[in-house]
Amino acid sequence: MHPDITEILYTEDEIANAISSIGRQITADYADKRLLLVSILKGSFIFAADLIRHIELDLAVDFIAVASYGAETKSSGVVRIIKDLEGPLESYDILLVEDIVDSGLTLNYLRKYLRSLNPKSVEIAALLVKEVKQETPVECKYVGFVCPDAFVVGYGLDYAERYRYLPYIGVLDPKVYS
Ligand code: 5GP
């Protein structure tokens, strides 16, 4: 285990099992739809890459990026799109793929924004949802794990661009950021 991690919350195997189950549900739910999977950069890139290989559909993939926390562990409360989607969305059912939902601010903003572009539908797949009271609750159609209210890293999730490569998800030692 990495010395900056105080506890492993989800092992590589547990994550793989959760993703394979979400993939099966998506395959069934979107069988007769035109699915566009939108990965929110950068944190969800590993989740999205693994998830699409568990969906047995002819789906399309795109990426959207919003300004991140930077080297902070709390949301600034401001969401800014720094990389937008490419094409017209009217013919697609969109599935937004997010690494972790905390306050819900990012996803509520993005869902509203994407709906304004008139796709057929917008749903959310989140690998982790934090056990916190969200100011505006986010409805996630697919959730991997409900996780404790700690700052977690690994499996795509970073702190100041570090730890994304860890194959598991763990709690970052507060000593690293305090
Ligand atoms: P929200 O807008 O829901 O408060 O925050 C969502 C974004 O904040 C996530 O996409 C992620 O980038 C970041 N975030 C929230 N909690 C954590 C966490 O525990 N660890 C990491 N690495 N990022 C987090």
Image: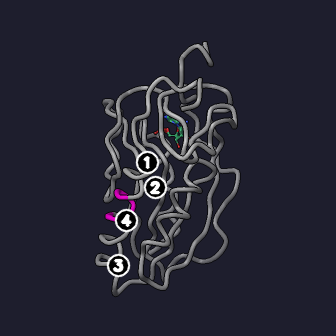
Q: Secondary structure at mark 1?
A: helix
Tags 3 and 4 touching, CB below 8 Å: no
Circles 1 and 2, Cβ within 8 Å, touching? The answer is yes
First of labels 1, 4 by sequence position = 4
Q: Which mark is residue 122?
A: none
Q: Nearer the viewer, mark 1 or mark 3?
A: 3
The Cα atoms of the two marked residues, 1 and 4, are separated by 26 Å
Q: Residue at x 54, y 32 (%)?
A: 1
Callout 2 amino acid: Lys
Three-letter amino acid code at the position of disc 3: Tyr
Residues under labels 3 and 4: Cα distance?
15 Å
Q: Position of residue 160 (x, y in %)?
A: 68, 32
Count of numbered circles in the view: 4
Q: Which residue is mark 2?
A: 112
Dot placed on the residue nearer the N-terminal end, 1 or 3: 3
* Separation of residues labelled 2 and 4 (CA atoms): 28 Å
Which residue occupies the foreground of this view, 116 or 125?
125
In the rendered structure, which amino acid carries the disc numbered 4? Ser
Residue at 43%, 72% (x, y): give it: 54
Q: CA distance from mark 3 to mark 2?
A: 21 Å
* Residue indicated by mark 4: 20
Contact between labelled residues 2 and 3, with CB atoms less than 8 Å apart: no
Find residue 39 and report its image quarter: bottom right
| Residue 30 disc label | 3
Disc 1 target residue: 108
Q: CA distance from mark 1 to mark 3?
A: 22 Å
Q: Is residue 29 within the magenta segment?
A: no
- Magenta segment main secondary structure: helix
Q: Position of residue 142 (x, y in %)?
A: 33, 58
